Structure formats: structure tokens, C-alpha cells
């Protein structure tokens, strides 16, 4: 029987760069763009001589890339050996498989370990699928002379095959990359594979999860998925990042403070030859001191993402430039980070206030949001009648002000570090967006650059914003916030024809 698990992509709304260092926090929103992992046995029957096998088979299929990769896995040390062409390898799935099976062996008792061994002898057949939202189809749309509208994106078949970027950025003969939209595809993919395998082996039971449990502090099954997915993802990418993308893929939207990198020091040693079984105990018993607090956008607010099509940015090189600037000018950088942290906290506070106001006086809150959705921000206060409505408008305006301060400090940091965190073209676009009717705020997600912009809109104003973006040569994506994390699915998503476009978004 196949097990299908999915995990969401993310948008880092606040905390770019700061989130790399404790105790700085970031607000990360999970989305309706999901990565799926389908796990089933490669063979229904076990061969009579399989008790003597030292190896088993693992097949990884990525239909969107037209790739099928075969591996042999050692049943002793759990290492995967690729027996297909090396070009088709996927280090994130490889590490996810190795770390998950090691964790299963370490946590299951004798009887269940026999069950695990039987499952392994049957071989593993793993298929990975990413929603269209993870990949950029802008070039595809433009090449066919189609309009840059969400309707065109929604008309694409689910899990459309992915073409590679043909252009070489530096003229060298390097392998072209798949064009991505910055939603954290590798973290969502890794998490979905880990979750599907852990459930398939009976280590966790994801079927008992209800939607609210993702936000609970003590869900042991989700915590195990998180620890293994973080470890596999860090080893696959060759560095210990902040982990916000994996955390949101597991638990959903949240306020996040990173774990101490030292918790993965033994895993980094393992890459140099230490057996994974020795390392997994340190990982499982490690002090995972990350912090997460439940968060989602206040009611009647919509997250919009746009793709300006101005070329991609490399997050690692931008992070490296910021770190270099911190070392060269510690006093100025510390002051900028202090201001940025204060602005991030102010925005978070206003969102909390707005959620509380909605809870306490829904009628006043709803009336203000609907009224502000058809006016520009300078007209908002004059629409308010009475103290309850004025309190809502004050919080909306304070949230806008906090976002403007965040953007200002991010721009200053970019200029000082010599990198385009909010380049001029994005500044013009964001200013124009924040000047539109019904827009609360707009910014560049995560590390910034040219990749994407986001906006938070009020009431029913989002359809007007997407039309305005089209006129500004911005492709409005189908992505929306969905606060839920990893989940068990009822079947193959291709059979159900589900996409974020169909299941979650209504296009006017």
C-alpha cells in the first residue's frame, strides 16, 4: 500500500538575514504550494533468498524532470550507491532516505525492526512531485505570447513538466538550473520524503494528526519528522542553515527562532566517514533548542506573491556578502540589525493586535477591513467611526509603518554590503504596490533580490492587485497562505488532479 505525504512551501515575511543568528526571530508563512512524496514497495513479494541479501533496491522517480534513478542500499551501513547516471542524483532525497532509515532502526523495538527489515527487502519505490507554484513558468508563458495572468497559470496541467533555463548566466558551459520561485522546494521535498518514509515504516502515525496539532508544542511524531528533515536537509546542502524552511514545512506558519548549529556537529563529521548509525543517536538525543510560536495572518487578509521576471538572486552569495560587511563594520552593522529587529518585532506586534481586535469585536474589524480594501491608506482613518474602528485602523497603519522601516533598513544593509537586497526596480514596484487600494504592505521575501515580491491585501482587493501587477509586467502567482504543515494524503495527487490553483484559489 502506498503512503503519500505532503509538505508546504514557505514565504519568510520578516527576519531575512537576522534569522541566521539566535535569538533573532522571523515570521514564516507556509503556503498552499505543496511537495508530495509517494512511497510504496518495489516488489510485492520477498524473494526466498532475500535473508542473505546485503543490499536492497531503491528507485527514485521525478516525473516532472523525466528522471528515474536507481540505487543500491547497503543493509548494513545504510549507504546509498547510485547505479544510474550521476546527473540524475538528488542529494536531498538521498540524505532523507539514509537518515530516516537510520532513525527508524534506532527508535523501533526488535519486532518492529523485523518489520522494517522486511519493508527494506521489498525495496523502496519513491516518487516526488512538486506543485507548479514551486517553479517559474514565466518564460514558458511569455514564449507563447500569453498574458501574464494567474488565469494562465491556473490553466497549466497539474505537475507540469519542468524545462531548464537555457541561458548561461556567465557564458560558461555550466549545467542550467530549473527556474524556481523561492518557496523552499528542497525543504518541502525533503520533509515530505522523511514524513512519508517514517509513516511507511510505522515509526510515526501521521493519520492521527488533526490540523491544530501542527501548532501544539508537544507532538512527538512531528518533532521526529522535524529533526530528521533538518538533519538530512543540512547535510544535503552542505551547510547548517537557519532551518526556518524545514520548520514551516513540518509545523506550518510560525514565529521561528533557529536551533543552535552545534546540534548537527556530529552529522557534519559523518559526512567525512563516521557511520550514520553512530550519528543518529546524537541527533535524536540532541538539544534542539529552536523556538516556534503559532502565527498566521489576521482574518480577511490575503498573502499575494508576484514574479517580476528580473532575473534570479543567489541567496548563499548574498548571505556571504552580509557576513563580510558585519566583520568589516561591526558597529554600523549591529546598529542596523538592532533597528531591523525592532521593526520586525513591531510588525509582529501589530499583527497580534489585529488578530485580537478581530476576536474581540468582529463586526467593527470586518467593517474596517472591507472599507479599507477599496481605499488607499491615507483615506483609511477617515473611514473609521468610533473608537473600536479607529483602533483597527491605528493597528493597520502601524503595521504599514513597521514594514516601511523594515524595507528601509534592509535597503541600507544591502547598500552597505554591496548587494541588491531591495534593488531599485523592486523599490519602485513595492512603492507602487503599497500605494494601491486595499494593500496593507509589500516587501521582498527572505534574503531579497530580484526573485519575487509579496503583498498582504485586505478584504476582496487581491483580484484588483493581480490585475495591476499584470500591467506592471509582474506575474501574480497562485500561492496563498495555508498555515498547516506536513500531512498524510489520501492518495496520489495526480489521480485526484489537485493543485493549489484548483483546491485553494478562486480566480476572478
Image (cartoon, helix red, strand yellow):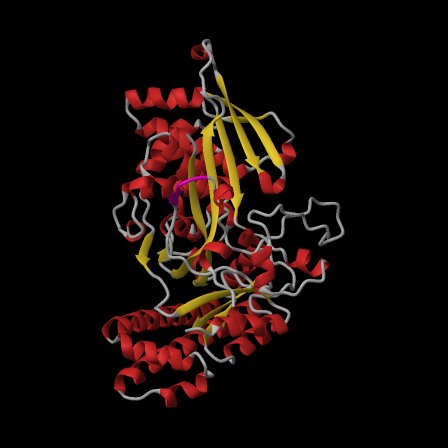
Note whether 269 is above or below 505 in the view shown.
above
Residue 209, horizontal then vertical, whole percent: 30, 44
What residue is at 48 percent from the left and 15 percent from the top? 54
Q: Tell me, yes or no, if residue 100 can be seen here.
A: yes
Residue 34, horizontal then vertical, whole percent: 47, 49
In depth, the one of 321 and 382 nearer the eye is 382
Q: Tell me, yes or no, if residue 265 can be seen here.
A: no
Residue 308, horizontal then vertical, whole percent: 61, 66
Note whether 24 is above or below 398 in the view shown.
above
The extreme bottom residue here reads 382
Residue 230 lies in the magenta-colored region: no
Residue 228, horizontal then vertical, whole percent: 39, 39
- Give the residues drawn in magenta, as a range: 487-491
Q: Is residue 176 left or right of residue 232?
A: right
Note whether 349 is above or below 43 in the view shown.
below
What residue is at 42 percent from the left and 72 percent from the top? 339
What residue is at 26 percent from the left and 86 percent from the top? 387
Q: Which quadrant: the N terminus?
A: top left
Residue 488 lies in the magenta-colored region: yes
In depth, the one of 410 and 64 nearer the eye is 64
Tell me which secondary structure the magenta stretch mostly adopts: strand
Q: Quadrant of residue 378?
A: bottom left
Q: Give the total of numbered labels.
A: 0
Q: Quadrant of residue 141?
A: bottom right
What residue is at 33 percent from the left and 31 percent from the top? 202
Amino acid at each position: 500500500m502506498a503512503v503519500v505525504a505532503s509538505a508546504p512551501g514557505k514565504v519568510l515575511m520578516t527576519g531575512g538575514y537576522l534569522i541566521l543568528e539566535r535569538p533573532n526571530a522571523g515570521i514564516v508563512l507556509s503556503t498552499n504550494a505543496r511537495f508530495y512524496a509517494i512511497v510504496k514497495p518495489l516488489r510485492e513479494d520477498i524473494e526466498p533468498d532475500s535473508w542473505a541479501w546485503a543490499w536492497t533496491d531503491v528507485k527514485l522517480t521525478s516525473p516532472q524532470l523525466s528522471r528515474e534513478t536507481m540505487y543500491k542500499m547497503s543493509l548494513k551501513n545504510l549507504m546509498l550507491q547510485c547505479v544510474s547516471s550521476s546527473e540524475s542524483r538528488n542529494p536531498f532525497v538521498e540524505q532523507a532516505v539514509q537518515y530516516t532509515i537510520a532513525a527508524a532502526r534506532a527508535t523501533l523495538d526488535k519486532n518492529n525492526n523485523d518489520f522494517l527489515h522486511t519493508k527494506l527487502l521489498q525495496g523502496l519505490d519513491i516518487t516526488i512531485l512538486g506543485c507548479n507554484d514551486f517553479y517559474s513558468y514565466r518564460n514558458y508563458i511569455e514564449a507563447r505570447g500569453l498574458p501574464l495572468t494567474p488565469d494562465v497559470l491556473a490553466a497549466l496541467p497539474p505537475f507540469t513538466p519542468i524545462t531548464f533555463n537555457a541561458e548561461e548566466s556567465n557564458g560558461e558551459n555550466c549545467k542550467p538550473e530549473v527556474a524556481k520561485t523561492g518557496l523552499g522546494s528542497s525543504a518541502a521535498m525533503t520533509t515530505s520524503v522523511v514524513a512519508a518514509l517514517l509513516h511507511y515504516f510505522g515509526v510515526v502515525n501521521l493519520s492521527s494528526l488533526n490540523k491544530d496539532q501542527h501548532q501544539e508544542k508537544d507532538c512527538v511524531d512531528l518533532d521526529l519528522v522535524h529533526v530528521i528533515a533538518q538533519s538530512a536537509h543540512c547535510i544535503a546542502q552542505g551547510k547548517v542553515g537557519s532551518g526556518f524552511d524545514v520548520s514551516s514545512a513540518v509545523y506550518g506558519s510560525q514565529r521561528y527562532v533557529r536551533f543552535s548549529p552545534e546540534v548537527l556537529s556530529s552529522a557534519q563529521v559523518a559526512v567525512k566517514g563516521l557511520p550514520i548509525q553512530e550519528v543518529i543517536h546524537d541527533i535524536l538525543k540532541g538539544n534542539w533548542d529552536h523556538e516556534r510560536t503559532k502565527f498566521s495572518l489576521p482574518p480577511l487578509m490575503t498573502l499575494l506573491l508576484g514574479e517580476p521576471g528580473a532575473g534570479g538572486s543567489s541567496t548563499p552569495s548574498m548571505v556571504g556578502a552580509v557576513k563580510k560587511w558585519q566583520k568589516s563594520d561591526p558597529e554600523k552593522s549591529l546598529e542596523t540589525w538592532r533597528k531591523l529587529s525592532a521593526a520586525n518585532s513591531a510588525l509582529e506586534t501589530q499583527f497580534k493586535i489585529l488578530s485580537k481586535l478581530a476576536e474581540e469585536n468582529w463586526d467593527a474589524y470586518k467593517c474596517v477591513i472591507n472599507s479599507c480594501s477599496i481605499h488607499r491608506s491615507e483615506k483609511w482613518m477617515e473611514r473609521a467611526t468610533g473608537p473600536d474602528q479607529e483602533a483597527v485602523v491605528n493597528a493597520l497603519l502601524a503595521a504599514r509603518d513597521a514594514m516601511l522601516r523594515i524595507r528601509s533598513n534592509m535597503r541600507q544593509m544591502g547598500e552597505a554590503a554591496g548587494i541588491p537586497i531591495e534593488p531599485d526596480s523592486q523599490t519602485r514596484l513595492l512603492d507602487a504596490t503599497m500605494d494601491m487600494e486595499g494593500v496593507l504592505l509589500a516587501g521582498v521575501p527572505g534574503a531579497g533580490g530580484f526573485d519575487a515580491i509579496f503583498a498582504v491585501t485586505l478584504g476582496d482587493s487581491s483580484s484588483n492587485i493581480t490585475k495591476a501587477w499584470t500591467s506592471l509586467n509582474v506575474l501574480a502567482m497562485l500561492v496563498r497562505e495555508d498555515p498547516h504543515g506536513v500531512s498524510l494524503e489520501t492518495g496520489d495527487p495526480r489521480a485526484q488532479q489537485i493543485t493549489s490553483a484548483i483546491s485553494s484559489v478562486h480566480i476572478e
